[in-house]
Every structure is written in structure tokens, then in C-alpha cells.
Image (spheres, rainbow, N blue to C red):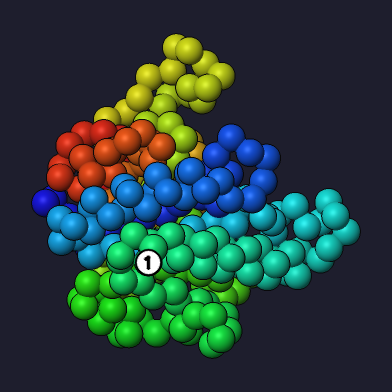
Amino acid sequence: MRYKRILLKLSGESLMGSGQYGIDPKRLQQYTEEIRAVKEMGVEIAIVIGGGNIFRGVQAEASGIERVQGDYMGMLATVINGMALQSALEGAGLYTRLMSGIKMEQVCEPFIRRRAIRHLEKGRIVIFGAGIGNPYFTTDSTASLRAIEIQADVVLKGTRVDGVYTADPEKDPTATRYSELSFQEAYEKNLNIMDMTAFTLCQENNLPIIVFDMNKPDNLFNIVQGENAGTLIT
């Protein structure tokens, strides 16, 4: 194994599958199998998942909802996705804990750093919901911060494409993939990998990021073993 403890960042939109909103059971099952394969290797896994398949805070203003209120609504959406993923993982025989940046003891534990690390040490998969508990911060920022707090070896950002490209590969057929980048190169090339807060947190704390295609079977497993199946930013 190349990494002993990972922070897996998934977007809420990835759970939609081919749908327009909500959670696709097939996609949820696929992710569960991918995560279980890595867990059986002995890797300690923490997960941050977005809520864009249910509600995005940045959409709030267009709906006439105040931005702060909209961000809190988005945080609650991430908890719903976290509960769905938790249920799927436990249905596959894995032990999990859902921890929230907002207190809601009936459904999940409040985030406490030492407790989260202890869960990982005991072999439990820890899912972080509700962001960091404050508006104006994205789930990318949550992933970076939580990864630093739990002393993860890497942030694995699962997307729909197999890495970072010179241009949008879904729009530009001539776009080429970077196999490796430095943080400085990513800044200079103005590559949209994470929001600036999340990216800077990783850079300042020497935390590498790997962007990869989560929808390709065995990709997560291969990356944890050290294969070049995405773009490494370090």
C-alpha cells in the first residue's frame, strides 16, 4: 500500500448517476464495492461527500434565499448523503461512523478530532457531514481541513474525469492529461482543481492531492496501491 490513511472526497452530483437529482442506488452500490475493496487492504478511510445532488448553497440566491441560509441547507444535504453512504457501507458489512460539523445527536456524532482518529485506528470508516459547520466554506475546503486534522496521507478527489487536463476534456478533444503537477504549477496555469481555500490548505501543509475518475472500476484500489491512475498534485 502506498497510503495508510486516506481522505476520499466525493461530489454529491456523482451520486445522481444518470439521473437529474437524488441518489442512484446503482452508483451508491458501486462506490460501496470500491470502498470495501480498499478497506479490506487495511487502509484507514475517511470520506467527505458533497450535497449538490440535493441542494447547493450557491444556488440559494437565485431562489431568493439568503446565502448563509442556503449554505446551511447545503450542509444538511451532505448529511443526507452521508447517511445514505453509511447505510450502504454497513449493509456491506463495514463499520462506520458519521460525524457532523453541526450538532444533531439523533443521527450522527459531533465532530471531535481525537474521536475521529480513534475511530480510524479501530478500523471504522469515518464520514464527515455538514461541512465544517460554517457558511461560505465548500466541501473541498472541508476535505482539506479534515484530512489535515486526522493526519491523512493524501486527499483523493473522485470526479467524472481521470485527472487534471490542459482544458475541459468533455469540451476540447485535444486536451491532454497531466500525470503530475506541483502546487505552484497549478496556480500558474490557473487550473480549477479545488477552490482556493482548500488548495492553499493542502499546499501549506504539504498534503498531496490526487484527482481521479471514481466511476472507473478499480481506480480507487489501484491508486491506493500506487498506480498512476490520475493526476498527482504535490
Q: Quadrant of residue 88?
A: bottom left
Residue 132, given in percent of the width and then of the height, sits at 52, 72
Q: Nearer the viewer, residue 64 or 185?
A: 64
Q: Nearer the viewer, residue 1 or 27?
A: 27
Residue 233, given in percent of the width and then of the height, sits at 30, 43
Residue at the right extreme of this rendering: 64
Tell me if residue 51 can be seen. Answer: yes
Would residue 114 appear left or right of 42 to someone viewing this image? right
User: What amino acid is labelled 1 in the image?
Assistant: Glu
Residue 205 higher or lower than 217, as above or below: below
Which element type, helix, strand or loop, lies under badge 1? helix
Would residue 182 appear left or right of 171 to someone viewing this image? left
- Dot 1: few (<14), some (14–19), or many (≥20) neighbours within 10 Å? some
Label 1 sits on residue: 90
Residue 198, given in percent of the width and then of the height, sits at 45, 57
Tell me if residue 197 can be seen. Answer: no
Q: Residue at image x 48%, y 12%?
A: 173
